Image (cartoon, rainbow, N blue to C red):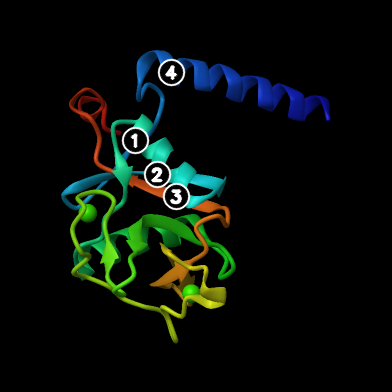
Amino acid sequence: MKGLGIVVGLLGILELVLAQDGTCGVKFVKLGNSAYHLERGKFNWWDSARRCMALGSQLAHIDSEEELNAISTYLNQLGFATTEAVWFSGFGIKSGAWISLANSQILSYLKWGPSEPNDYGSAENCLGIKVNSGNWFMYDLNCFTEYSYLCEGVSRESAINLI
Ligand SMILES: [Ca+2]
Ligand SMILES: [Ca+2]
């Protein structure tokens, strides 16, 4: 438990650094025309959106098959279980359309998993992706379930420090 305490302490310091320097120390990877930051862990959709904004970024907005393929290749290198998901910039509205938090527009590219979106329990209004045999598909998920998240786009300052 002592080790955990040290880790928690270090995270506290990291958060302090982030608060002072914005994106300092946060790695974005360049894939195609965009830069992304993956945070693995347990975050609900709202918290994920907030954390991306705190980096001068947004939850990732997928607008083409090419972009999803590039992200899929990247995520496959990291290894995700089928039970995991990664939050993206989409939430459902009453009409059945999906709106991107990144630009407030209706999402034009959607690649749903089998039988999705199913609004399971009438409680699935947020967009995530899950992997099946190396292929990533979109799912409507409960916004309060905790998953990893992917941010897209960085502020001018941090773009200079792209890794
Ligand atoms: Ca994008
Ligand atoms: Ca679903």
Question: Badge 2: how crowded within 10 Å, few (<14), some, or many (20+)?
Answer: many
Q: Residue at x 45, y 46 (%)?
A: 46
Q: Are marks 1 and 2 in contact (CB under 8 Å)?
A: yes
Q: Nearer the viewer, residue 69 or 13?
A: 13
**Image quarter hosting the C terminus:** top left
Question: Which mark is in front, 3 or 1?
Answer: 1
Residue 32 sits above or below residue 65 on the image: above
Whether residue 88 sits left or right of residue 10 in the image: it is left
Q: Are marks 4 and 3 in contact (CB under 8 Å)?
A: no
Q: Which circle's residue, 4 or 2, is located before the other in the chain?
A: 4
Q: Which circle's residue, 4 or 3, is located before the other in the chain?
A: 4
Q: Which circle's residue, 3 or 1, is located before the other in the chain?
A: 1
Identify the image quadrant of residue 161. Answer: top left
Residue 114, position in %: x, y? 44, 85
- Tag 2: amino acid: Ala
Q: Residue at x 39, y 44 (%)?
A: 49
**Residue that carries the numbered disc 1 in the rendered image:** 53
- Tag 1: amino acid: Met
For the residues labelled 3 and 1, the Cα–Cα distance comes to 12 Å
Residue 142 sits above or below residue 5 on the image: below
SS class, disc 2: helix
Q: Which circle's residue, 4 or 1, is located before the other in the chain?
A: 4
**Residue that carries the numbered disc 4 in the rendered image:** 19
**Residue that carries the numbered disc 3 in the rendered image:** 149
For the residues labelled 4 and 3, the Cα–Cα distance comes to 20 Å
For the residues labelled 4 and 2, the Cα–Cα distance comes to 16 Å
Whether residue 38 sits left or right of residue 43 in the image: it is left
Residue 17, position in %: x, y? 46, 16
Whether residue 121 sits left or right of residue 140 in the image: it is right
Q: Are marks 4 and 2 in contact (CB under 8 Å)?
A: no
**Residue that carries the numbered disc 2 in the rendered image:** 49
Q: Are marks 4 and 1 in contact (CB under 8 Å)?
A: no
